[in-house]
């Protein structure tokens, strides 16, 4: 492994588990992959994609977190300097007035030459006690961790979202980068309602329950291993990227993520061939503390414009 995990003494922190990837299907050469997020009454199949679980080794990224990892790997870890409570994150006004500006400052540090940074949305997730074997009713109560390897946006979808949300036409910028931020905390019985973008902050504390796996973007062949897929709702749609398995992928997680730390990972970058999105997924951690609280996370998406 190019990153030298063994040499940094983190082999004992590596996790052997499985991730779910898209099965390559010749029909997708003429039939676009899709997944329906509403009930058609059986008129249309819910999806035309199949998934497969493949064994992977996921390494602790802590030894590398102080390196310029965002440019190298496509993700990095930052300290927010904030310690919001569960109640704080349910206060929409407080989140937008206090948390959003703090996050913008962190993004500016990564992209000091950006012309504009706009935050799109935020949301919360919490693993149900029965996850991943949850019923539709249980999963509708709270947004669950994502278990399929994916990239949130295709570049085309990011452009459409920028135009719809911020009235930013492609002629107004020369480069567009979208990022997701995620953080973590103990929410216990709190319920979460929405799904969001690219900053990942997990709130379950250091129990390491269903953590976030991130793939080194340099190890992805975007032409051969990713494909745009429609995610269709009753009255709207978006487009993400699904990812097929490769033994060349290198996977990482952040062990013992604290509630004042936040992961930022790239979704799209118009300057990178293939978009440079970081494939990611939550994963079952067989080494998690037996009494670890269910994984809960706060996520936020941001758009970075360069003129």
Image (cartoon, helix red, strand yellow):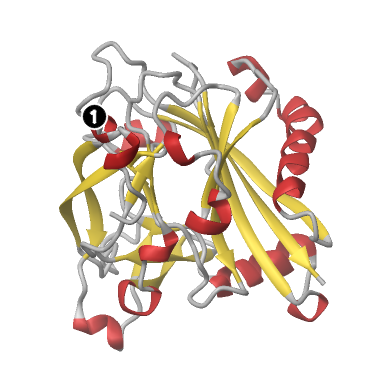
Seen as rendered, the residue at the extreme bottom is 30
Residue occupying image coordinates x 55% and y 56%? 266
Q: Residue furthest front?
A: 7
Observer able to see residue 193: no
* Element marked by disc 1: helix
Q: How many marks?
A: 1
- Picture quarter with the N terminus: bottom left
Number of residues whose C-alpha sits closer than 10 Å to that of mark 1, classed few (under 14), some (14–19) or many (20 or more): few
**Horizontal arrangement in the rendering, residue 274 relative to residue 214 (left or right):** right
Task: State the image quarter where residue 17 is shown.
Answer: top left
Relative placement, left or right, of 56 versus 207 is: left
| Relative to 205, residue 232 above or below | below
- In the image, 271 versus 280, the foreground residue is 271
Residue at the (33%, 55%) spot, across then down: 149
Residue 68 appears left or right of 303: left
Q: Position of 30 compared to 238: left or right?
A: left
Please tell me in which quadrant of the rendered image residue 100 appears. top right
Quarter containing the C terminus: bottom right
Residue name at image x 28 percent, y 65 percent: 47
Q: Measuring from the top left, give residue 262's x and y in whole percent.
A: 57, 34
- Which residue shows up at 42% across the image and 64% down it? 218
Q: Nearer the viewer, residue 25 or 202?
A: 202
Residue 294, percent across and down? 36, 21
In the image, residue 77 sits, relative to residue 205, either above or below, namely below
> Residue 292: x and y, percent?
32, 15
Q: Nearer the viewer, residue 300 or 8?
A: 8
Q: Which residue is mark 1?
A: 12
Task: For residue 217, say whether it is visible.
Answer: yes
- Vertical arrangement, residue 130 with respect to residue 25, above or below: above
């Amino acid at each position: 492994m190019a990153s030298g995990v063994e040499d940094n003494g983190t082999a004992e922190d590596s996790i052997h588990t499985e991730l779910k990837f898209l099965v390559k299907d010749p029909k997708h050469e003429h039939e676009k992959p899709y997944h329906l997020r509403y009930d058609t009454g059986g008129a249309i199949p819910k999806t035309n994609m199949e998934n497969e679980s493949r064994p992977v080794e996921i390494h602790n990224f802590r030894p590398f977190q102080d390196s310029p990892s965002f440019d190298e790997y496509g993700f990095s870890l930052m300290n927010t300097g904030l310690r919001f409570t569960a109640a704080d994150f349910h206060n929409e006004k407080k989140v937008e007035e206090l948390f959003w500006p703090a996050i913008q400052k962190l993004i500016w540090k990564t992209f000091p030459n950006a012309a504009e940074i706009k935050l799109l949305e935020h949301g919360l997730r919490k693993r149900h006690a029965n996850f991943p074997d949850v019923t539709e009713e249980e999963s509708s109560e709270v947004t669950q961790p994502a278990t399929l390897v994916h990239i949130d946006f295709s570049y085309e979808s990011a452009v459409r979202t920028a135009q719809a949300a911020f009235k930013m036409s492609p002629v107004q910028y020369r480069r567009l980068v979208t990022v997701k931020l995620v953080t973590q905390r103990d929410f216990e019985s709190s319920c979460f309602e929405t799904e969001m973008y690219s900053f990942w902050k997990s709130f379950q504390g250091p129990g390491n329950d269903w953590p976030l796996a991130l793939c080194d973007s340099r190890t992805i062949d975007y032409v051969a291993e990713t494909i745009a897929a429609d995610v269709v709702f009753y009255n709207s749609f978006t487009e993400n990227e699904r990812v097929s398995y490769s033994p060349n992928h290198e996977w990482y997680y952040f062990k013992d993520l604290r509630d004042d730390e936040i992961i930022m990972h790239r979704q799209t970058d118009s300057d990178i061939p293939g978009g440079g999105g970081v494939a990611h997924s939550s994963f079952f951690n067989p080494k998690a503390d037996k009494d670890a609280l269910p994984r809960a996370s706060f996520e936020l998406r941001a758009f970075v414009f360069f003129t």
